Image (cartoon, grey):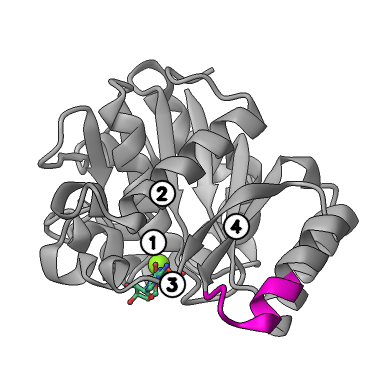
Amino acid sequence: MTTLAIYSNKGGVGKTATAVNLSYLASRTGAKTLICDLDPQSSATYYFRVKPKLKSGAKGFVKGGKQVNRSVKGTDYENLDLLPADFSLRNLDVTFDKLKRSKKRLRKILSPFKAEYDFVFLDCPVSISTLGENILNAVDTVLVPLIPTTLSVRTYGQLLSFCNKNNYDAGKIYTFFSMVDRRKKMHREIMATVSKAYSGVLPSFIPYLAEIEKMGIHRAPVGEFSPKSVASKSYQTLWDKFQETTHLSLTGK
Ligand SMILES: Nc1ncnc2c1ncn2[C@@H]1O[C@H](COP(=O)(O)OP(=O)(O)O)[C@@H](O)[C@H]1O
Ligand SMILES: [Mg+2]
């Protein structure tokens, strides 16, 4: 099993759009794939047309085992399952905090999925507290969507220095540019500077595209309702480049 978090300590950067489209693309190659929606807003759950219901809520979730397994639902797509989120996850940070080894719980919760899945994607809410640390401890790779603006780059820098200061392996963090408008000089300049300054910047980006916003209307990955679009091709290239760069094989590690 290979675990990937689509994570950022910033909101509205395209995490959920990325998690939904990449998990869909992974499953299309025949790899058994699970997407875990960890966000109480349950947007990934909504996109996959699943009821936002986590059996036994956040308390059951942190216990792991059968409680979590029973909540997993199939999606409309072969090889792709979803662990839905619901509103109880708004307290996930506090619930983790009350437990022993509270920063390594998520890793334990996910471990039973090892036998069953090739890929496990986490669609993460914004958090750099206990939940954020659980995510960093739980996954093999972190993928951060980065809008090429000054504030987003600053937030990304904060994440990397947090990892360095707290002994998290910053080497497993990758980023790509999200919501890119190549007509904007500032976007082009920031992309060039960041690509030089940081390692782990993928050589592929996702443009700002109306087709991606339409996922909310179709409630499906772009590859389903607009397979020939630039949006669909951009996610495919991103997934290919991500696998090449991180040396993930199509069937997981
Ligand atoms: N590349 C893109 N182009 C245009 N709109 C996008 C793109 N990526 C995401 N969006 C839209 O921006 C909003 C925030 O995206 P979302 O994936 O939910 O971000 P996050 O999960 O980081 O909060 C959503 O309405 C989504 O449809
Ligand atoms: Mg989201």
Look at discs 4 and 2 and give the one toward the viewer: 2
User: How far apart are the alpha carbons under marks 4 and 2?
Assistant: 14 Å
Residue type beneath disc 2: Tyr
What span is colored magenta in the figure? 181-190
Estimate the spatial distance between the alpha carbons at disc 1 and disc 4, rounded to whole Å.
Answer: 11 Å
Tell me if the residue at label 3 has its CB under 8 Å from ligand 1: yes
Question: Along the polypeptide, which appears first: circle 1 or circle 4?
Answer: 1
Few, some or many C-alpha atoms within 10 Å of disc 3 (few <14, some 14-19, many ≥20)? some
Q: Nearer the viewer, mark 1 or mark 2?
A: 2
Is the shortest distance between ligand 2 and the CB of mark 1 under 8 Å? yes
Label 2 Cα crowd, 10 Å radius (few <14 / some 14-19 / many 20+)? many
Three-letter code, disc 1? Thr
Residue 89 horizontal/vertical position (percent):
37, 65
Check residue 105 for magenta coloring. Answer: no
**185 left or right, relative to 85:** right
Residue for badge 3:
208
Q: Which residue is mark 2?
A: 235
- Please tell me the numbered disc located at residue 144: 4
In this orientation, does residue 64 appear? yes
Q: Quadrant of residue 160?
A: bottom right
Q: Is residue 62 left or right of residue 194?
A: left
Q: Residues within 10 Å of mark 4 (few under 14, many from 20)?
A: many
Indicate which disc, 4 or 2, sits on the residue closer to the N terminus. 4
The Cα atoms of the two marked residues, 4 and 3, are separated by 16 Å
Quick one: 72 or 145, which is closer to the camera? Answer: 145
Q: Amino acid at mark 3?
A: Tyr
The quadrant of the rendered image in which ligand 2 is seen is bottom left
Which residue lies under the disc numbered 1?
Answer: 16
Which mark is first along the chain, 2 or 3? 3
Residue 100: x percent and y percent?
A: 62, 48
